[in-house]
Image (cartoon, rainbow, N blue to C red):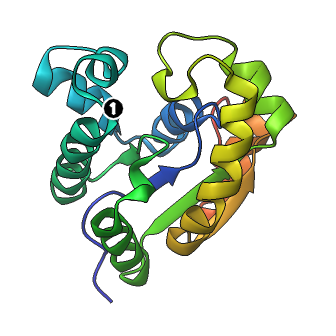
Amino acid sequence: MSEPTGPVLVLVGPPASGKTTVGTAVATALGVAFRDTDADVQAETGTTVADLFVQHGEPHFRVLEERAVARAAAEHDGVLALGGGAVTSAATRRLLVAHGAAGSAVVWLDVDLASAAQRAGLSRDRPILGVNPRAMLRHMLAERAPLYAEVATATVATGGRSVQEVVADVLVALGAPAGSGAGS
């Protein structure tokens, strides 16, 4: 059987679910590179995601994000974290479903509202959360949950759990030995 091409792992989930933190730790545990599509968009445009939202609006950002996801899925063979709203693109969802069907892992880092709100706070770096982060998170979690479920090959809860616990579960979802987590 041939090895899947593209990222060994794609992480999806809402803002503050731990995609960057967990993704970095899993990449370290596996000895592969970590890549974040929000960072790719920022590098391409020379501006922050927050400023792109303010200056050009969400639809403009989503076009850039969709291209960044397609490019990263084709080029990157390590751990890939997608922005929280990447799954709102039908093209991105098709790409992720195909990726999972080809034998690669797409893990939904699921987070409860209380944990996400605590982690997100009033961060200017999370423009989609706007003025009332808790209300926006509640709406976002409910609206996007079916989209995350559609693309995921596995789901790992992150709320109220340590990074090490989440990393261990993600490694299990990948079929890696549970003891190969960061710090072992």
Q: For mark 1, give the secondary structure.
A: helix
Q: 10 Å neighbourhood of mark 1: few (<14), some, or many (≥20)?
A: many
Query: In the rendered image, which residue does mark 1 sit on?
Result: 38
Q: Quadrant of residue 83?
A: top left
| Residue at image point 21% right, 14% down | 47
| x then y, percent, for residue 164 | 74, 35
Frontmost residue, 4 versus 30? 4
| x then y, percent, for residue 46 | 14, 15
Q: Quadrant of residue 172?
A: bottom right
With respect to residue 163, does 112 lie above or below?
below
112 on left or right of 155: right
* Residue 161 visible in image: no
Q: Quadrant of residue 42?
A: top left
| Residue at image point 81% right, 31% down | 115
Which amino acid does the dot numbered 1 rest on?
Answer: Asp
Frontmost residue, 169 versus 85? 85
| Residue at image point 37% right, 18% down | 50
Which quadrant of the figure contains the N terminus? Answer: bottom left
With respect to residue 55, does 92 lie above or below?
below
| x then y, percent, for residue 138 | 74, 41
* Residue 138 visible in image: yes
Count of number-bearing discs: 1
